[in-house]
Image (cartoon, rainbow, N blue to C red):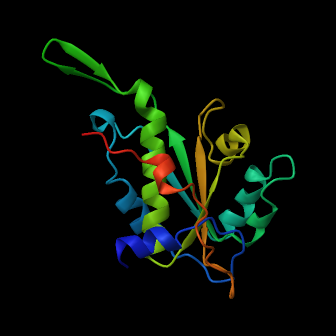
Amino acid sequence: MDLEKLFLTRQSTREFSDETVTDGQLERICRLATLAPSAINGQPYRLYAINGGKAKKFIPNIMVNGANKWADGVSAFIVIEQAAPYTVQRGTRTITNEQFIGNDIGILTAYITLAAEDMGVQSCIVGLRDEKAIAEFLNLPEGTRFPLVVALGHSADGYPVREKQRKPFENVYKLIK
């Protein structure tokens, strides 16, 4: 798919068909996403791909305060765990990625959604989630951070690609010479 078409068609999908996402598709999406840049190449995350019957059991973890009811049709999830900050020594300087972790996870998430869309898999980034329940589901310590979850599946027949509603370009762009 050409890049502009990819940007124009990728959207948050909230109505999915019964078609499943394969384990191979999940692995490829995650492999491509980990090519995303990150501060000092710290890659401050771990990805958990949840598929099949486990995906259906995972759904309650993102049903927070009545939100995300659309998730019943999701066939797979990628859970992003936030790793501890990473420090490197470069000569006499000590450099950390601590203040960039949120940026790095945001870039990673964009790569996940674009890689998925390029493969014909639709996505929705889930911000509302129960981190304590997710840690329990994944058998990880309480307090483990999961800043985002990406729901994946194939859009339902007839689900429209919506026209992008954005601010006028001149309101967000200024060339400085």
Quarter-of-image position of residue 7: bottom left
Q: Nearer the viewer, residue 45 or 128?
A: 128
Q: Is residue 39 left or right of residue 64?
A: left
Residue 85 seen in render: no
Image x and y of residue 137, in percent:
68, 48
The picture places residue 153, in percent across and down from the top left corner, at 61, 73
Q: x, y percentage for residue 29?
A: 43, 65
Q: Is residue 177 above or below residue 1?
A: above
Q: Residue visible at 59% across and 41% down?
A: 146
- Residue at left offset 63%, top offset 74%: 162
Residue, far left = 91
In this rendered view, identify the residue nearer to me: 103 or 154: 103
Q: How many marks?
A: 0
When the figure is inspected, residue 108 is found, relative to residue 40, above or below; the finding is below
Residue furthest top in the image = 92
Vertically, is 154 above or below 130? below
Which quadrant holds the N terminus?
Answer: bottom left
Do we see residue 44 in this rendering?
yes
Taking 147 as reference, is 84 left or right?
left
In the foreground, 120 or 86: 120
* Quadrant showing the C terminus: top left
Residue at 73% over, 72% down: 73
Q: Position of residue 128 (x, y in %)?
A: 72, 46
- In the picture as drawn, the residue positioned furthest to the bottom comes out as 157
Instruction: Out of 165 and 125, give the one closest to the viewer.
Output: 165
Measuring 64% from the left and 29% from the top, which residue is drawn there? 143
Residue 59 occupies which quadrant of the picture? bottom right
